[in-house]
Image: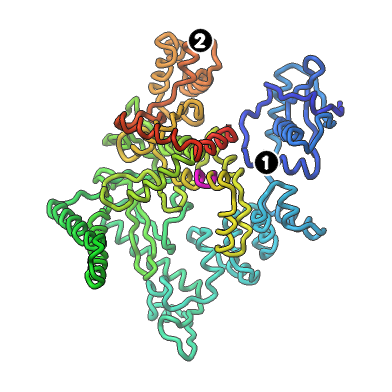
Amino acid sequence: MIQSIALKKLAASPRNVRKSSDALADLQLRADIAARGLLQNLVVRKGKRGKFEVEAGGRRLAALQALAEEGTLPESHEVTCLVIEGEESEVREASLAENFQRLAINPADEAQAFASIIEAGASLEDVARRFGLTVRFVEGRLRLASLAPCVFEALAEGTITLDMAKAYGAISDVERQAHVYAELQDAWYQVTPDTIRRMVLDATVRGCDPRAVLVGRDVYLAAGGRIERELFDDDASESWIDAELLEDLARKAMEEVAARTAQEFGLAWVRPTLGTYVSHDLVEGLGRLPCQPAPMTEQEVQELGQLEADYDRVAAVLEDEDSDEDKVAKAERELVVIDRAMRFLNDRPPILADELKAEAGAFLVLSRNGEPTLVPQFYTETEVITDDDGAVEPVEENGTVKPKGSSLSQRLLDELAMQRRDILAIHLANDPALALDFMVFTLADADGHDWRARKASTLVGSVASGPVTGFEAKDAPASAALAEFAGSLDESWRAGTSDVERFARFRALSDEARSAWLGHVVSRTLVASLACDGERSTPMHEALGSLLEIETAHWWRPTAANYFDRVPKARTLEALDAAGGPELVSRYAASKKTELANAAERIFSGNFIGEADAKERAQAWVPTIMRFTDADVPSDLVKAAQVDAEAEEPVRGDVADEIAEQAA
């Protein structure tokens, strides 16, 4: 029965199957309801004291309540609802069915819909505001609507991906788009967005193009390639007309070099790409093998020590205010030479263990000067099993990994490291005072004097990427909080038409707004790490975690999907022992792995019958590698830092507290 019910009489049902959400999507839904009202009924069931429990539509209810809190809607606002009756299992099934029956809209359909709305008189800003999107997102979808018909149809049918469609849209010439699309229909090689982008942009290719340098003029002409020259053109500036032919010749040349390189280095495979870097789509599904930098010889260690001494000696000339201009100029030239020599020694190529080469592979890229270059990072097509320290587990003669209770897969370790990084990031984002200190220290400490230390962040402005391509822990509270934090930033300064104007607008923001930006840009540079020894260890993260007093269990809980289904049964039983002792272990020891994983998820969420202290231990338990251990910092220095922080609290601490309250 359809019925209009006052918003204040609606409450979320504990039986609603959706337990997680997306902060950005929730904001978009709120904006959409504010612009057009509720387009889909809520499914409710009569509760107690005249209340109605929302069985399906929890996100819509939360959006309506948020609009009421901010005054956009009155609490007496009437909401159209479908009132259902039945047993609890039937109600839960209805909630599940409603969520399962939804299908994400195709980008092509979005593009056509946005184009129709704008043709009816709406502006880009109107569309963005109504749907809770950015203007840039709407512009991107509208660009899709102007693609060549064959390309747009392929996107609508799912023949090509959204990234491929965007690559075709790198040029507005629809005839060129259609021509490249037809050329690639019979391609025998893997077509990537980078391949498409190069081909649509390269109607002609200069003689200095890396592909042209690789293939060579004579080979290109012998294969039927055409070249055009203007009056003042030379070999570097002349135009090579047949870009498709050149692409094919360059690809074949790279494949020949890749085959020779694989044989030379004893690798299972070497895959070539005409790009200057290894793109994400090339490494998707591959396991990254751990490598260690090549050790220095005694002679190189002595040479580096001498260079460091020379550096200090020459730098003293620059620091001496009495040094004349000639000495200063000479010292600056010498420092450039010394620094280059130190970098050469410190830039150690990684070494792959001989026993891993049988299944190891690498990628061959084309440098900007046209030379095939092997990227010093190795991968395997099979899942890598490592121990807690990141070392590859020993392999039996038949190729299987030796069973070991503590073994975790490379993929799982990478995912856990990224989720732990997000937990640290949201705390650092909410403490701009600490973020500022960390940023200044990292920049000041980046002088290369300790080249062996693994850096704790990328702090040069770039965003740190994780070891797993495309992985997002969407259901994790820390990741959701980070997305919400980023969405709350004041981006009004982006409206400037030049970098000078944008900088002036940014400086005009309040102290609170700029502090939030500080925490954001520093937190997003954090690399992924775990609390263990080996290549995934970052001691600086432990120090930051100690200062922030992070409790991982408040931000991450082990589930079947993110942990228990991915570890050996013995590891799960160890966790049960830590929570409930031998009695809890014996209860589930005979369970199959899938049943055990589901039971463990329920237990470590606290949803089980047991003693209060056992529940408390279960809800506080996380794997050792996910904890933030106490850093080895002298206590007197910690106390001194706390005293300084308290003295500065009126300047920076209040801002941090306000941001933390907003995030909470």
| Residue occupying the point 41% across, 50% down | 459
Question: In the image, what residue type sits under mark 2?
Answer: Ala
| Residue occupying the point 24% across, 61% down | 320
Of residue 421 and residue 318, the one placed in the foreground of this image is 318
Query: x%, y% of residue 80?
Result: 84, 31
Task: Pick the quarter of the image with the C terminus.
Answer: top right
Q: Is residue 174 left or right of residue 373?
A: right
> Dot 2: within a 10 Å radius of its alpha carbon, few (fewer than 14), some, or many (20 or more) residues?
few
Query: Is residue 415 something that shows in the picture?
Result: no
Q: Going by the picture, which residue comes out furthest to the bottom?
A: 231
Quarter-of-image position of residue 21: top right
Q: Is residue 198 above or below residue 349?
A: below
Q: Going by the picture, which residue comes out furthest to the front?
A: 322
Of residue 352 and residue 34, the one placed in the foreground of this image is 34
Query: x%, y% of residue 487?
Result: 61, 44
| Residue occupying the point 41% across, 30% down | 626
Q: Mark 1 vs mark 2: which is more N-terminal? A: 1
Mark 1 and mark 2 in contact? Answer it, CB < 8 Å. Answer: no
Quarter-of-image position of residue 278: bottom left
Q: What element carries label 1?
A: helix
Query: Is residue 46 something that shows in the picture?
Result: yes
**Tag 2 residue:** 612
| Residue occupying the point 59% across, 46% down | 489
Number of labels in the image equals 2
Q: What element carries label 2?
A: helix
Question: In the image, what residue type sits under mark 1?
Answer: Leu
Q: In this view, does 449 lie above or below 614?
A: below
> Dot 1: within a 10 Å radius of its alpha carbon, few (fewer than 14), some, or many (20 or more) residues?
some
**Tag 1 residue:** 27
Query: x%, y% of residue 490?
Result: 61, 48
Please state the extent of the stretch shown in magenta in the rendering. Answer: 516-520
Q: In this view, does 443 lie to the left or right of 564?
A: left
